[in-house]
Image: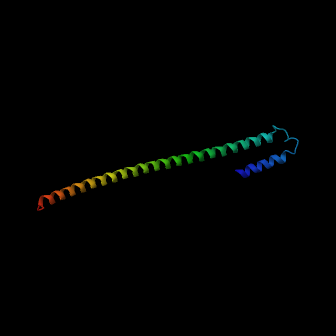
Amino acid sequence: MKKKLAALLAIAVMSMSSVYAAESQGPISRWLDGVTGKVAKKEQSAYQKQQEKQQKIAAKKKAREQKLAKKRAKAKQKELERKKKAAERQKRVEKKKKQFKELFSKD
């Protein structure tokens, strides 16, 4: 694409030396403007598509990270609840042991 553009510009520069092509709106000048305009539009379009693609990828990545963070937070919450229940259970067991000791101990 850029090689074609460079070749077209070289042709334009070489043809500018002639009186006919020296006109600002000559046929070669108009043709060259049209071709370079089309090339610029295509490059701009390709750039915009690439930017949109990058934005979609970034949005997907962000959504995936948020989902993973939620999952981790939920797992951490469950772990804390499990530890709390285990501690409560251990307290009850210790209390029962103490009661049995007091019940069966010889004072």
Single out the residue that lies furthest toward the top. Answer: 25
- Give the quarter of the figure containing the C terminus: bottom left
Please say which color scheme the image uses. Answer: rainbow
Asked if residue 21 is positioned above or below residue 84 in the image, the reply reads above
On the picture, is 65 further left or further right than 41?
left
Q: Could you tell me residue 48's position as x and y percent?
A: 61, 44
Residue in the image at 63% along x and 46% along y: 47
Tally the numbered discs: 0
Q: Nearer the viewer, residue 12 or 48?
A: 48
Asked if residue 71 is positioned above or below residue 101 in the image, the reply reads above
Asked if residue 87 is positioned above or below residue 21 in the image, the reply reads below
On the picture, is 75 further left or further right than 3?
left
Residue in the image at 69% along x and 44% along y: 40
Q: Could you tell me residue 93's position as x and y percent?
A: 21, 57
Q: Nearer the viewer, residue 105 or 33?
A: 105
Q: Could you tell me residue 96's position as x and y percent?
A: 18, 56
Single out the residue that lies furthest toward the bottom. Answer: 106
Residue in the image at 73% along x and 44% along y: 36
Asked if residue 81 is positioned above or below residue 34 in the image, the reply reads below
> Can you tell which quarter of the image residue 28 is in?
top right
On the picture, is 30 further left or further right than 103?
right
On the picture, is 40 further left or further right than 55?
right
Q: Could you tell me residue 89's position as x and y percent?
A: 24, 55
Residue in the image at 80% along x and 48% along y: 11
Single out the residue that lies furthest toward the right. Answer: 19
Q: Nearer the viewer, residue 2 or 74?
A: 74
> Can you tell which quarter of the image residue 32 is in?
top right
